[in-house]
Amino acid sequence: MQDRRQKIKGIYVILIIGLFAAACIWLYLQTDSIIIQHGIRFYRKLRTGVLSVGSVLSVLMIVLYGVEWRRRQIWKREHDEKAAELEVRKEELLREQEKHKEVLSVSKKMDAQKLQELLLENAAEKWHSLSQQLLQIRMQMSIMDEYQEKLAHLLDVNGAAALANTEDVLDRVEQYLCKNVRKVLNYMDVADDDSEEAVREVEKRLQICHEDGQKQLQQVQEFLFALAEFLNKQGEDDNSMEMLDIYKSTILSSIESEMKYPES
């Protein structure tokens, strides 16, 4: 429809230009004849009239083209804005889909942040009746994040590069928590939130997950205090490096014995 209107407008413009050009050519070819028959004054008035009409038409055409150009610019801007908005929505949808893609896969390191987002979504939507329990587990994962940050800061301010592998210990604990959360989320996906029995079973699994998480967090906290105490004792004797290795080995062995992943 828009293209048809543009074609019609183009035909009108060409017709007007053609008529004006024909009038100018006729006036030029009939100059002598007009002067002889009607006199020089009439010819001048006729010429002035033709040129005036031509000037008016030229101004109108410029104005119309200006309005049309402005209208096209506005349309283009609105079209570009809509296209950009659609692109943003498309990207947001893709990000949302990507966010949930293989979140619970154990083929690679699990993303604790994405699991926290899933816990929030379940607390706000399907399993809002168990939102308190879900948020408690999410809080445990947040605390785990804080412990990891504290460890990184502790090693950094003490220049304890030799203890960098202790960060792997906390990573193992975090992955252990993630796998426990994964088990609950998988069960929640297939459970019926309208069934009282299913709700009780989910609540039971959440409770087990929370209790186990508390146990691991307590151990991590004790580990951090023990590590801080060890750092405080560095430099007090000549056997500090040897003691460091022994202490590190003891801590890692203790953590690994507790952090054995149960079969999924």
Image (cartoon, rainbow, N blue to C red):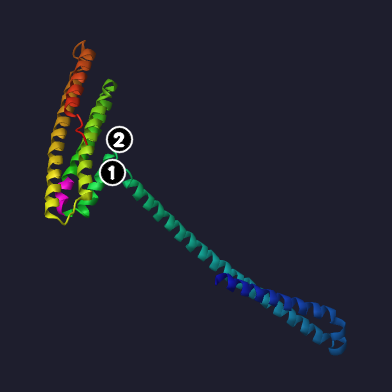
Does the rendering let one see residue 211?
yes
Question: Which amino acid is tagged 2?
Answer: Lys
Could you tell whether 75 is left or right of 115 in the image? right
Mark 1 closeness class: few <14, some 14–19, many ≥20 residues within 10 Å: some
Q: Residue at x 17, y 51 (%)?
A: 131
Instruction: Determine the image quadrant of residue 208.
Output: top left
Element at badge 1?
Answer: helix
Q: Residue at x 66, y 74 (%)?
A: 11
Could you tell whether 164 is left or right of 196 in the image? right
Query: Which quarter of the rendering shows the C terminus?
Result: top left
Q: Is residue 258 above or below residue 110?
A: above
User: Residue 101 at what x, y percent from top left?
Assistant: 33, 45
Question: Which amino acid is tagged 1?
Answer: Lys
Q: Which residues fall within the magenta stretch?
A: 129-135
Q: Is residue 101 above or below residue 170?
A: below
Residue at the extreme bottom of the image, as rendered: 37
User: Residue 141 at what x, y percent from top left?
Assistant: 21, 40
Does the rendering let one see residue 228?
no
Q: Which mark is residue 109?
A: 2
Element at badge 2?
Answer: loop
The residue under label 1 is: 114
Between tags 2 and 1, which lies in front?
A: 2
Q: Magenta residues: mostly which secondary structure?
A: helix
